[in-house]
Amino acid sequence: MQVTVTGRNLELTTALKDYLTEKLQRSQKHFDHALAATALLSVAKNPSVAQNQTAEVTIKLNGSVIRGEESTENMYASIDLVADKIERQLRKYKTRYYQKGNKIKSKNGSHIVDIGAQMDYDTIIAKEIAEDSLMPKIVRSKRFTLKPMPAEEACKHMDLLGHDFFMFINSDSNQVNTVYHRRDGNYGLIEPEA
């Protein structure tokens, strides 16, 4: 696995990079081809944030993005947690969308090809039904009017409503944007690419 590591507000030591690479290497066993991961290790300077050491890992895989983020008081503990999360997500991705040997297609591709001797068709269908019942579902839908405003005003509206995010039309770009609360106490802005 090729890992690109960057640091924010901390000195990246060789030991820290090697530890991260070694932990993420466990995830590589699920795939035949080499994976490329980007990692950001950061320390929040805000003293009120107790869990101020964050490890973020992103892996792009066949058009999908596998991402994990964990924060603790210790960078090595954050790396352990995020590596476990990434491994679980990659294993889930691999078993859900491609099973080596049985060549089971994804749920939206309803056909099943080359069923192995140990699994019959009924078992596979029963397994998919059980997995579908565990999948999160959209249980509520909401409509509202988007108002043009600057991002700073959208942050004020979000705080007044007590929400973690707020969608609005950015008056500077005339595009739909979203502001959100970051764990470090600041705000984030999500804008669509042109």
Image (tube, helix red, strand yellow):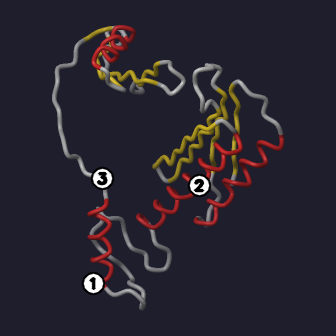
Task: Please give the residue where the numbered disc 3 appears in the rendered image.
Answer: 136
- The amino acid type found where label 1 is placed reads Asp
Is tag 2's residue or tag 3's residue first in the polypeptide sequence? 2
| Count of marks placed on residues | 3
Q: Position of residue 42 (x, y in %)?
A: 66, 30
Task: Please give the residue where the numbered disc 2 appears in the rendered image.
Answer: 84
Q: Position of residue 157 (x, y in %)?
A: 30, 13
Hey, which quadrant is residue 95 in on the image? bottom left
The residue mark sitting in front, 2 or 1, is: 2
Q: Position of residue 132 (x, y in %)?
A: 28, 63
- Residue 64 lies, with reference to residue 143, above or below; the image says below
Task: Please give the residue where the numbered disc 1 appears in the rendered image.
Answer: 122
- The amino acid type found where label 2 is placed reads Asp
The N terminus - image quarter = bottom right
- Residue 53 lies, with reference to residue 175, above or below; the image says below
The residue mark sitting in front, 1 or 3, is: 3
Q: Position of residue 168 (x, y in %)?
A: 29, 18
The C terminus - image quarter = top left
Left or right: where does residue 92 sit relative to residue 41? left
Left or right: where does residue 85 sit relative to residue 153? right
The span from disc 2 to disc 3 (Cα, nearest Å) is 21 Å
- Residue 42 lies, with reference to residue 34, above or below; the image says above
| Residue appearing at x 35%, y 21% in the figure | 177
Closest to the observer: 173 or 166? 166
Is tag 2's residue or tag 1's residue first in the polypeptide sequence? 2
The span from disc 1 to disc 3 (Cα, nearest Å) is 24 Å
Hey, which quadrant is residue 48 in on the image? top right
Residue at disc 1, secondary structure? helix
